[in-house]
């Protein structure tokens, strides 16, 4: 466990997600620690117990673990001795060759000085049980102890062990600003907070580091929660707290396509994490080309969710808001042993209520024979109306009330967040010398440009472009096809979460689809303006061939470039691919004089885009009764999407 912010370590994980034999046992130990009685309030967490409950549901409904074989330790049960005893009695002692074992720890991580010279950085990473405090620092569980547990399992012939740690082992960028927003909290306790003394790493030789790397099992797959200089977040999603990585990893596994690889899975997790937390970048080490099979049951040709309960009036599925399920969406239900998941199946259900990890539905006319264990495949997704939820902090009661009133009057798509609604942005106000100043803060605590004006109305007008950008990005990120009939991939020429500096950098994008299709590539700039990158003046035909990579801008036109421009902030690029030709923008690219087209009403275009996609798909493909044109859900067949986000910064930052 030499990675910082370690999230996911798998030994032979392919066997977790695929059957390793009829007699193989499947057992899981899940540890979630919210409460640390010996630590200050700022170190108390809120999402760790939810993490392990969420993963327990996934293991039992989709990955073949019996509920009796999934043991949970929550908060004050999770002492050092309690974790060690449960690991031994639940996982180690009954272990036999062929078993599939799963361990998760959600809580704080930390570091202590390396005791045996096996760490290149001179530090052991640790898990922090609930009984750790300034007087009990030695209660931490080091990576060396975990290695001994895994060695014992290996000696007993167990090869299929999954180890999940949603904690952070580096606190180098903990920000007071972030904590003040109350949107997230880092899962890290620094040694200074425990002992009052910094960790003093011991020197280790290069030979020891090389030997440690060589001793790592070849089958290990590591997904780290973030880079070494970043942090993993304990954050609120729809009113409920989870670890950011657990939340998005759960959603990715729940919706994973058949034969998805680790690299593809991580890419999906990365972009969803960074849409919410741009400075948190999950990392992958190991065999990224290995497939992650979605179920130990009969292999399925399409992603599905499991029916957990059914009667004549109600069907319950083991997926909810965490997996993107929405009221009004429809699913076709198939028998538990159906492998193809095609055709009319047992009938269609419509979602009527959604909870974080499950949803209820009503059977539509003609549905029959639906029971627990059946497989449900989404055939049409409903995109509910949405707003940009904003919380206003600071400046005192009167200035805040005046600003809030102006915000409501001038920005129609903004709604005020409350305790039940996680804000998309926080506006920090300050009143001084008869003027109001404000800046917008992103969910991960990054501040935008500060503005100062003489009155609330002028201040709202100054902030509007940044709010418009945030709303457009939210709407476009939400326009995702949860069950596409083909794939399209969008990437750029730098690593995930790249940083570009305006006035200096150029950006290139790559697009590839696995089927002949027609693509539209949209850029939502930091100013809130939407620009159509493809089709364009040089490529008015937006048809692309299956398997061919298209570069934007095209390398055969050296003067055709995409320059990064201000203001600073976060930018999104979205690709929408359709099997049939469609002009989503209504523009004539054959008569354009400029290279790219900028839409005159960017926000209006983005707001109506979901309806345009739905209308096109319904017209282009024959639909079953449940998704007739009068229905509001958008069929999932015939189109696909992808997106990337990146940071734009001021080049003067590098010289400071």
Image (cartoon, grey):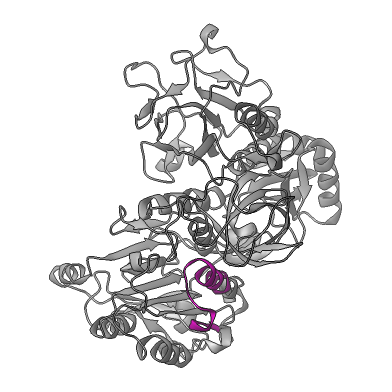
Q: Is residue 204 visible?
A: yes
Give the residue displayed 38% in from the left and 56% down from the top: 283
* Image quadrant occupied by the C terminus: top left
Q: Along the horizontal axis of the image, is 74 left or right of 206?
A: right
Query: In the rendering, at what x and y percent does residue 333 appear?
Result: 61, 54
Give the residue displayed 42% in from the left and 85% down from the top: 140
* Image quadrant occupied by the N terminus: bottom left
Residue occupying the far left of the picture: 207
> Which range is magenta?
51-73
* Above-or-below relation of 391 to 140: above
Give the residue displayed 75% in from the left and 63% down from the top: 312
Q: Along the horizontal axis of the image, is 144 left or right of 180?
A: left
Q: How many marks?
A: 0
| Nearest the eye: 642 or 13 | 13
* Above-or-below relation of 402 to 282: above
* Above-or-below relation of 207 to 639: below
| Nearest the eye: 495 or 516 | 516
* Above-or-below relation of 612 to 420: above
What is the chief secondary structure element of the magenta stretch?
helix
Query: In the rendering, at what x and y percent does residue 77 appear?
Result: 55, 89
**Residue 63 is a magenta residue:** yes
Query: In the rendering, at what x and y percent does residue 610 appear?
Result: 66, 35
Q: Is residue 355 visible?
A: no
Residue 317's quadrant in the figure? Answer: bottom right
**Residue 383 is a magenta residue:** no
């Amino acid at each position: 466990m030499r990675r910082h912010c370690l999230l996911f370590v798998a030994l032979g994980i392919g066997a977790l997600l695929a059957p390793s034999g009829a007699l193989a046992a499947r057992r899981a130990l899940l540890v979630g620690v919210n409460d640390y009685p010996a630590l200050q309030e700022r170190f108390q967490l809120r999402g760790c117990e939810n993490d392990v409950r969420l993963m327990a549901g996934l293991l039992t409904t989709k990955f073949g673990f019996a509920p009796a074989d999934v043991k949970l330790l929550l908060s004050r049960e999770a002492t050092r001795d309690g974790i060690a005893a449960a690991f031994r009695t639940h996982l180690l002692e009954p272990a036999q060759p062929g078993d599939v074992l799963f361990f998760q720890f959600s809580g704080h991580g930390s570091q202590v000085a390396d005791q045996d010279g096996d760490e290149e950085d001179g530090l052991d990473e640790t898990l922090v049980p609930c009984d750790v405090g300034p007087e009990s620092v030695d209660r931490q569980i080091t990576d060396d102890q975990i290695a001994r547990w895994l060695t014992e399992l290996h000696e007993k012939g167990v090869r299929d062990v999954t180890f999940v740690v949603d904690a952070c082992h580096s606190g180098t960028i903990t920000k007071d600003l972030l904590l003040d927003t109350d949107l997230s909290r880092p899962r890290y306790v620094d040694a200074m907070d425990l002992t009052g003394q910094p960790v003093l790493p011991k020197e280790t030789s290069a030979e020891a580091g090389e030997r440690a790397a060589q001793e790592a099992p070849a089958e290990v797959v590591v997904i780290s929660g973030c880079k070494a200089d970043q942090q993993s977040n304990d954050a609120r999603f729809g009113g409920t707290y989870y670890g950011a990585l657990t939340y998005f990893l759960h959603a990715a596994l729940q919706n994973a396509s058949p034969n998805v690889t680790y690299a593809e899975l991580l890419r999906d997790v990365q972009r969803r994490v960074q849409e919410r937390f741009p400075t948190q970048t999950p990392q992958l080490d190991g065999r990224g080309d290995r497939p992650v099979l979605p179920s130990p049951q009969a292999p399925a040709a399409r992603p599905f969710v499991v029916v957990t309960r059914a009667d004549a009036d109600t069907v319950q599925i083991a997926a909810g808001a965490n997996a993107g399920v929405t009221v009004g969406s429809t699913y076709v239900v198939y028998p538990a042993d159906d492998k193809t998941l095609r055709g009319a199946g047992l009938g269609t259900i419509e979602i009527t209520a959604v909870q974080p990890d499950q949803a209820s539905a009503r059977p539509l006319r003609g549905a029959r024979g639906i029971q627990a264990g059946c497989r449900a495949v989404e055939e049409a997704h409903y995109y509910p109306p949405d707003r940009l939820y904003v919380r206003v902090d600071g400046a005192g009661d009167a200035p805040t009330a005046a600003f809030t009133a102006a915000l409501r009057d001038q920005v129609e798509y903004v709604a005020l967040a409350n305790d039940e609604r996680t804000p998309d942005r926080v506006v920090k106000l300050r009143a001084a010398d008869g003027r109001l100043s404000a800046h917008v803060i992103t969910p991960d605590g990054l501040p935008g440009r500060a503005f100062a004006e003489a009155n609330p109305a002028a201040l709202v007008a100054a902030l509007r472009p940044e709010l418009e950008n945030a709303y457009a990005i939210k709407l476009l990120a939400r326009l995702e096809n949860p069950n596409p009939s083909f794939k399209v991939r969008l990437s750029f020429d730098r690593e995930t979460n790249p940083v570009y500096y305006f006035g200096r950098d150029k950006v290139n994008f790559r697009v590839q689809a696995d089927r002949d299709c027609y693509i539209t590539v949209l850029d939502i700039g930091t100013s809130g303006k939407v620009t159509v990158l493809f089709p364009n003046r040089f490529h008015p035909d937006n048809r692309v061939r299956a398997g061919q990579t298209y570069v934007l801008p095209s390398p055969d036109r050296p003067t055709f470039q995409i320059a990064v421009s201000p203001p600073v902030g976060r930018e999104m690029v979205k690709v929408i691919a359709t099997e049939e030709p469609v002009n989503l923008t209504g523009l004539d690219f054959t008569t354009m004089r400029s290279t790219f087209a900028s839409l005159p009403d960017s926000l209006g275009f983005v707001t109506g885009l979901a309806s345009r996609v739905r209308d096109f798909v319904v017209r282009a493909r024959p639909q079953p009764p449940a998704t007739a044109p009068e229905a509001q859900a958008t069929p999932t067949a015939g189109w696909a999407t992808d997106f990337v986000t990146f940071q734009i910064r001021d080049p003067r930052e590098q010289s400071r």
